[in-house]
Image (cartoon, rainbow, N blue to C red):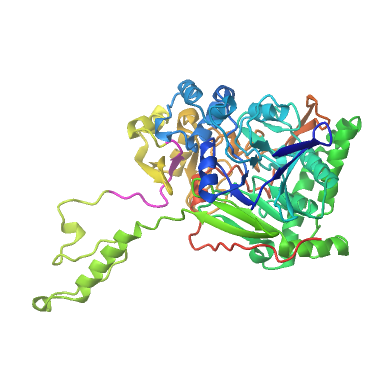
């Protein structure tokens, strides 16, 4: 039975009473809503908490979303085969408009239904228009509940302890922190890209504090991981969260940890918060004089902005000091006791919270890394070792075959070497050869060469098409040139609409194109400005580059007391490393990484 009470024009709180609560935590269904029913049945879940990239798309979404962003979203959709995506943008929109990016329309029409209550935030890659229709009530699905800055939900466990689900949707981009985008209400974003703003943060603080109850266990849900985003960590602290649940990293395994287990010292944790505060202040100092006059005549907005600023002002100013003794005491308690769950994508696994008599036990499941490829390597190595260690008696006078490393050619056939075989080895490209990484590797080599200007095609020395690690259905291409200069000139003229994301393959001895590699060193360089989707750099241009600029406008109000007056900024964000992170490269996590599932030993007071 669902009972909904309203405490204001825009603040809704639902109460769900169930028996023997099993709360399933899931992430990134990306439009495959029917998967939630299968997961709930398999895990005997009473309800589901979802952490974004839910699949808020309808039949018109493909028309509204830009071609580049649309191609990026479709490339990671479980409902779309990337190999079938047409290169032509108009055809792409027609194809995805017909097949759809999400099963949501079937649930809106009533053809399909959710078998258990689902509480979800919106993620970084959603359709703003669809999310706003759910906020306004134009769209609704039974058992689907949006979690945002003005709506929290309480789940009764039947043991006297209730769970408060609260959260914020979208990505955290400091250079968009005062920009409402195309949103008509407090929801910020554009068609295909969503982010969080200062006013949303202020509204959530107001909503949660107004309905605070010490008997509740508070679950803070967000898309980026708070342990990587100091502002979200501070927000969770201010909301007195016991658990945080996030995704956004796309690891093969889910993570369960507190700050004490991942940081060397308490000062290290405070230093992380201090760095996030400093990064925010760099942006705030740039736009303060323009933002404050805009909210002077809007008391509600001024209050929400001040809520956000008050929380950030309470953040440590350094790793060794700052703040009152009581604040530091609580910070130390949270350092040890606030527990974080970062989920793997739903296609790989889930995490389950089982609440019995107030105790929160945890079960984590994942398909994990596939190491079956090592069987052949192991067998080959064993055969080589056996051949060299046990020579026949009549071969005692022959030269002993040297041992070889896995993957190297071994001389096990009477002294025959690679040079004496009838089939020569294919030419190998040096690891530091200059070239261009191309995201769209789902076309034949001849067609892929057409992505480049005519004058650059003749300079291509080699094209290698590869499958993405852990995503064999997704392919990319490495296009090699003779010199770094040729690669740099070629990437300037590449057809970004057909190629998708492109970047220089940047070895250590020359710089990558337009800003270089994010992590430095060798490997693939920074994304090219012409080929990268806007989800990797925001609408203000490449992250960390360019000159700070601001423009301001008033967002319209739609029955929403917290409608925003916005300040659009494009400012370098040195500490913001959590992009949409939809790149499959994030799946290449260290297989030896630990995964400790536990619950807090003490609770922040």
Q: Residue at x 63, y 31 (%)?
A: 141
Q: Is residue 274 above or below residue 453?
A: below
- Is residue 582 rendered to the left or right of residue 117? left
Q: Is residue 33 left or right of residue 361?
A: left
Query: In this view of the protein, can residue 398 be seen by the observer?
Result: yes
Q: How many numbered marks does the figure carry? A: 0
Q: Is residue 429 magenta?
A: yes
Image side of residue 319 versus residue 79, left or right: right
Is the N terminus in the top left, top right, bottom left or bottom right quadrant? Answer: top right
Give the magenta range: 427-440
On the question of residue 476 being in view, the answer is no
Residue nearest the viewer, comparing 487 with 437: 437
Residue 398 image position (x, y, % from top left): 13, 75
Which image quadrant for residue 60?
A: top right
| Residue 163 on the magenta span | no
Q: Residue 356: where, in percent of width, then height?
A: 66, 58
- At x 78% / y 40%, what residue is drawn? 198
- Percent x, y for residue 149? 75, 39
* Front residue (pair 554, 222): 222
Which SS type dominates the magenta stretch?
loop
The one nearer the camera, 98 or 312, is 98
Q: Which quadrant is the C terminus positioned in?
A: bottom right
Q: Is residue 533 left or right of 226 when viewed as pictured?
A: left
Front-most of residues 422 and 190 = 190
Q: Quadrant of residue 33?
A: top right
Residue projecting furthest to the left = 394
Q: Position of residue 445 (x, y in %)?
A: 34, 34
């Amino acid at each position: 039975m669902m009972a909904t009470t309203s405490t204001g024009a825009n603040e809704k709180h639902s109460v769900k009473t169930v028996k023997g609560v099993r709360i399933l935590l899931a992430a990134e269904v990306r439009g495959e809503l029917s998967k939630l029913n299968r997961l709930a049945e398999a895990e005997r879940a009473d309800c589901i908490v979802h952490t974004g990239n839910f699949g808020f798309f309808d039949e018109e979404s493909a028309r509204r979303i830009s071609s580049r962003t649309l191609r990026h979203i479709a490339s990671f959709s479980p409902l779309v085969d990337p190999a079938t995506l047409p290169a032509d943008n108009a055809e792409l929109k027609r194809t995805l408009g017909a097949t759809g990016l999400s099963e949501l329309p079937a649930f809106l029409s009533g053809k399909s239904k959710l078998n258990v209550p689902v509480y979800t935030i919106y993620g970084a890659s959603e359709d703003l228009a669809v999310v706003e229709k759910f906020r306004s009530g134009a769209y609704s699905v039974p058992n689907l509940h949006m979690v945002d800055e003005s709506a929290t939900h309480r789940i009764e466990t039947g043991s006297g302890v209730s769970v408060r689900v609260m959260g914020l949707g979208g990505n955290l981009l400091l250079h968009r922190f005062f920009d409402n985008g195309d949103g008509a209400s407090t929801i910020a974003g554009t068609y295909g890209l969503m982010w969080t703003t200062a006013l949303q943060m202020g509204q959530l603080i107001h909503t949660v504090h107004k309905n605070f109850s010490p008997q509740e266990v508070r679950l803070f849900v967000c898309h980026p991981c708070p342990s990587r985003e100091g502002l979200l960590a501070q927000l969770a602290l201010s909301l007195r969260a016991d658990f945080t649940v996030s995704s956004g990293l796309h690891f093969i395994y889910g993570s369960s940890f507190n700050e004490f287990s991942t940081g060397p010292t308490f000062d290290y944790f405070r230093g992380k918060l201090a760095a996030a505060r400093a990064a925010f202040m760099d942006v705030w100092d740039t736009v303060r004089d323009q933002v404050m006059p805009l909210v002077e005549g809007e008391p509600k907005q001024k209050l929400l902005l001040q809520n956000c600023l008050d929380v950030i002002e309470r953040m440590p100013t350094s790793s060794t000091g700052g703040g009152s003794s009581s604040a530091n005491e609580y910070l130390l308690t949270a350092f040890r006791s606030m527990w974080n769950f970062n989920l793997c994508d739903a296609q790989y696994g889930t995490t389950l919270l089982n609440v019995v008599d107030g105790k929160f036990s945890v079960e984590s499941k994942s398909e994990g890394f596939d190491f079956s490829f090592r069987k052949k390597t192991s067998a080959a190595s064993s055969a080589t070792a056996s051949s060299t260690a046990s020579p026949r008696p009549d071969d005692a006078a022959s030269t002993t075959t040297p041992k070889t490393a896995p993957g190297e050619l071994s001389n096990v056939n009477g002294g025959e070497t690679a040079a004496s075989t009838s089939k020569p080895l294919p030419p190998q490209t040096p690891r530091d050869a200059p070239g261009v990484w191309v995201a769209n590797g789902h076309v034949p080599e001849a067609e892929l060469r057409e992505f480049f200007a005519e004058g650059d095609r003749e300079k291509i020395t080699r094209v290698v098409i590869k499958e993405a690690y852990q995503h064999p259905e997704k392919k990319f291409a490495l296009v090699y040139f003779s010199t770094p200069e040729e690669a740099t000139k070629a990437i300037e003229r590449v057809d970004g609409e057909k190629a998708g994301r492109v970047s220089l393959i940047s070895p250590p001895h020359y710089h990558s194109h337009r800003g270089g590699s994010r992590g430095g060193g060798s490997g693939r360089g920074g994304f090219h400005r012409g080929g990268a989707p806007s989800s990797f750099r925001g609408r203000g241009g490449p992250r960390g580059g360019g000159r700070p600029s601001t423009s301001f406008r008033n967002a319209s109000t739609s029955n929403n007391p917290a409608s925003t007056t916005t300040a659009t900024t494009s400012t370098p964000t040195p500490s913001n490393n959590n992009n949409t992170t939809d790149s499959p490269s994030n799946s290449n996590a260290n297989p030896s990484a630990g995964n400790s599932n536990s619950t807090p030993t003490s609770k922040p007071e």
